[in-house]
Each structure stands twice: as C-alpha cells, then as structure tokens.
Amino acid sequence: MLNITTFDARAGGNVLYKALAHPLAAEAIGRLYHRLGAAGAVALYDPDNLAEALLALYPDLPGLAGLFAHDVTEVGGHRAGLTVRALTEMPGSGVRAVLVAAFDAGRIAARVRAMMPPGTEVLTLDEARLPEAMLTNRARYLDRLNFATNFAFFRDADGLSTRLVSANYWAGYGAGPVRLWLRLYDEAGGELATWEQELPRAAAGFSIDSREVRARFGLGAFRGQLLVHAIGAAGHDVVKYALDTYASDNGASLSCTHDANAWPSERFAGLPAPRADERVILWVQNSHATPIPPGGIALDRMGAERPVPYRREIAGFATVALDVADLLPGLHWPAQIEVLAGRHVVRPRYEVIRENRVRIAHVNVERADLKADPAIPHLPADLGRNYLLPFPVLPPARFRSILQPTPMAHAQSTLPLRLDLFDTEGRKTGERFLGCLPRDHDLVLDAADLPGVAEGHGELVYDFRDGGEADGWMHALFRYEDKSSGHAAETSFGAHIFNTAMTYKDEPQSYTGKPPGLSTRLFLKLGQGRRQSFAVLIYPASAAWHPRSATKLMLHDGAGQVIAERPLAIACSGSATVRPHETFDAAALRAAGPNGYVLIRDETCRLFGYHGLTDDAGGFSLDHMFGF
C-alpha cells in the first residue's frame, strides 16, 4: 500500500499529495532525480516531513545516502523506512548533493547551502512546481486551489462514447478567468493528447465529448482516463461532473456516473458480483506515474477478509479491464465485492455487461477513519430519524427498484437498518425492518415486495431494535430495471441528516459554509439528440420541516445566463420528477443550447436528487446529482 495521505475528513483533500502526484510534477521529479543521480551520493533533508509521501510516489531516488532532519526528537527514529539523522551531520557525510523535500524552499535551501562544502549541489522540490501560468495562487504553492483536479474514465471504443458535463461553478465564488488543462491517457498509460479549454466567465455549462476529442486529435479508438485541472478556481478545489456513457453506434447502452472523487483510497465498496447471465468488469486506472506492483490491487468477497490479488503490474496512468470472475470465480449476485486498492486509484468505474447492453456505475470510498458512534442510537428527538439515505422508487408498473445495503467503512461489522417508503406527496406507504445485518450479508430487497408500494422514494434509516452499531456512514446500492426493455441502471450513495434546525457534528451538511445545510444548488444537464434528461428530486426530512419546498428551476444558456425560471413545490418527505423538455418550451431549450443546464435552487430546504437520461429505445441512466 502506498504510504500517502490523500484525504482528511476534517481538512479535505491533501494538497501535498496532489502537488506530488500531478502528471507534470511526475515528469519534473523524473528530471530532478536524473540530475541528482549524476551528482553522486544524495542527502534528503526533510524539514516538513514530506519524505514519506515523496518516496512512496517516487521511490527510485538515486544515490540516497541518508535522511536528515533538524528536530532533535526525531533523530534516531524512522521515516520512510530510513533512520533519521541529525542535520548537523550532513556537512561531514560525504554527500555531493542535497534534496530539500519542501516547496517554496528558497530560504531553507540558502541555509543548507551555507552549511555544505563548496561544490555541493542543493536542489528543492521547487524544481517540480507546475508552470506559473497554471497556478491560481502564485504566492503560495501548496494552496488547494492550485490543484483543482480530478480524473474521469474516458473512452471512445467498442461502440461506446463518453461525454463529461459540468459548469463553471467557480464563477459563482468570484473566480476570474477559468480554463481547463486536460490530458488524455490511453490504456497503456501513454499520453494521447494534452490541451486547454477556456470556460466562459459566467457560471456557464461545458462539455467534453470523446467523439469530438477523437476527431480533433485524429485518434483511433481509445480506453483510458482524462485528467481535468481547473486553473483559476475559487471556492471549490474539486472538479465535479456528470459522465454519460452512451452508444455511439445507436445501440441500447446508456449510463451516467458521478465524478471520480479525486483522492485515492485504501479500499472501495459497492461493487456487485455478477448475476449468472452477466459479466462485471472493474476498470482499474492507475492515478500515479509509478506502476502498481503485482498484488497491489485485490478483490475480496465483502466480509470474507480473504483477498485475491491481481498479479500483474499496472503501468503509470494505465487502465486495466479486470473481469471480477477471473479473481473470484463462482461468486454471484447478491454477493458484494470489496476492492483493496492500496491508495493507487481514485474511485473506479465498473461496467455490467448483459446481453447487448452495457451499464456503467461507480464504487465508493470505504472510510478507514470511522469507528462506531455510541451516541447515534440515543440522539435526541430534535433530530427525528437523524441519518437518512434517500433513493427513488420509480413507477412500479414499469420499473423494479432494488436496494442492497453496502458496508462502507473498515470497522462496520453490523448494519441495523429499516426501510421507510413514501409516495410523491410525502405520505408514508410502508416500512420494513431489515434486521441487524452482518458485514457479509447478501440481503437484496425489491421495493415492489412491500405492500402498497407507489412511485415516490425510500429512505434507509437506523433501527436498533435488534442491537448493532452505527457511524453515520450508511450506504446502499440501488438498481433499477425496466420490465419491458430489459435496460438497467444502478447508483449508490450515503446517508446524511436532512432538514433539521438542530445539528449533530457536521450534519445537516451544506455545500458552502457551516451546517445546517438548509439550501439546495443542484446541477441538471440538458438532453442531447434523442436523449432527454430528467431528475428525481427528493425532499427528505429527518424531522418536520416546511410543508412544501420553495424550489426554483432555473434554465441557463451556454453563456451562464438565466433565460427561464419555473417554480416547483415538493411536499416534505415527498418527491418530484423533473423533465426539462416538459418544463420549458422548445424555444427556451433551443436558446439554452447544447451546454445549457438547469440549476435547481432552494433557499428553504436541502433537496437530494438523482439524474440521468432517457432515450426512445427504452434506455435510461441514473446516478446521484452534484451541487455547488
């Protein structure tokens, strides 16, 4: 496993990790190591405790003769597998070069240079800085806004294409000019293309389509990943997007997935085992320039703790299609699979192949830092049902709506759960206690199995009648099947406390500012060609809140200007399906253009939503929405 810190639940993404892992930094560190190798014996001075991350991502530092630090309490200890030596020993150590493991390190380097014998070369990680033109904050290199990056699964092959859709939401936080730096990698990790894309100054939508990229650069078919780096960002340091996978040959496949979650994790969960008539392919995409060693990726039956390693090396930035049946033969739905990823990859995609249809979905980050919270079973009545996990129940005459709770933290051994069902007007239509599920459970529930089920939504909640523990990180996989066309889609997400005046820890969450997060800003893309977009908006409430929402559907054009607006009132604990092609007239939609979008805005409550596309062949996609 890589000894790196990628994400802190309190501080967010680790800036140092992103600064070291950026592809341009990787290239520069390669040049830096080559230069040090020519100098001879090298001392690594580690003033800011960065050596472990540096050597984890780039272990082949040539001529490394010792690691030095100035903190006397660290001397004699171990860091990055090396014994820490006193800085004062460095001048007499015989080294010919010093690497100062720090950015913005001019003053530190000057002090070290004064200590060393003449002719000793002193270099710093400033040699691996991004070009100044790519920095949002040039005064402070390790500013999170300098590394607003994310990866996307990107392919144009096998009759399937991908389209990344988002908006310049940074403009809403006061950003000036924003542009995207983009690099596309092929399956082997080779660079296919690098380019930049200017974004409009306002909060305008934008898209990146694999067919257009392929034509622009004269590429053949490709399967790989796209790195997106937003330069000039403000407010958010995460690149959020929706990614459509569609049949470019007018076939039946259609899927939508959320952004990739920009920080590699030790484990991921929410990967379903295949049914007997399915193949499940996990797309493993190395997020670093350093190869993943044989055995660095493994799969396991959830709860078994008997991982089966993938025994081939995966090159830097390469993509591998891993058929889960090759590692776990004979394992079938409803079994769940855990991905042991060793912090090598960001949130992977998987695809399910059944007959002539392919559907794409994503796994989720398994938390390593969470423990059971003994307060959750005893939270006060002010928080009502507290943590809720809402999900759509599509019209049962046409669709099957299937749920499967998924463990999503290393320490989760029990899942004490109940399912509550509501119709679109917020009336409770039924409930079922699911039990105190073990980590290796194989429970699957079709909402249609509950009496009185109707179109609306369900909410998973904690229920401790049979004991069990909770940590607030409740997740589930949701699968939807069209009974007539055979098309399916699946998505997964986690719980929050919704729409209460009282707070617990960081709940209810807000997209900006401190909790309670009683507001909504959700992005809904428009359709494309024969595919129309839609969203299922849910008004979940842990306790009683406003009887109806005061929601606005704001149609934006390709320049980010609001050109039409419609009100929407959703019942508390109710839901509504929004179809832009029915909500707005044809003239307004034409004016919005291909990069137009709908902003779902509400200042009175926090809505949760799932969005996707439908087509005229019975295909549909579905995944949870993002906000900003």
Image (cartoon, grey):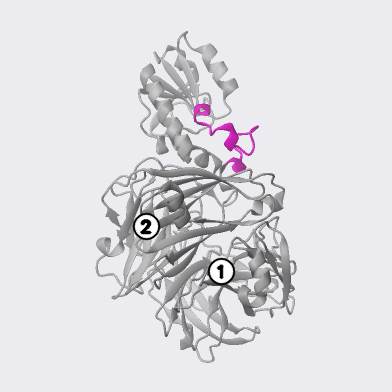
Residue 77: where, in percent of width, then height?
44, 30
- What is the number of the mark on residue 527? 1
- The three-letter amino acid code for the residue at tag 1 is Gly
* Element type at mark 2: strand
Q: Residue furthest bottom?
A: 452
Point out the stretch of residues depicted in magenta: 125-146
Residue 78 in view, yes or no:
no
Q: Where is residue 590 shown, x and y percent of the image?
A: 64, 68
x 59%, y 40%: residue = 146
In the figure, 602 relative to 45: above or below?
below
Are there few (<14), some (14-19), or many (20+) residues within 10 Å of tag 1? Answer: many
Residue 283: mark in rendering: 2
Q: Earlier in the sequence, mark 2 or mark 1?
A: 2
The foreground one among 515 and 144 is: 144
Is 499 colored magenta in this rendering? no
As for residue 126 lying within the magenta part, the answer is yes
Q: Residue furthest top?
A: 118
Q: Amino acid at mark 2?
A: Trp
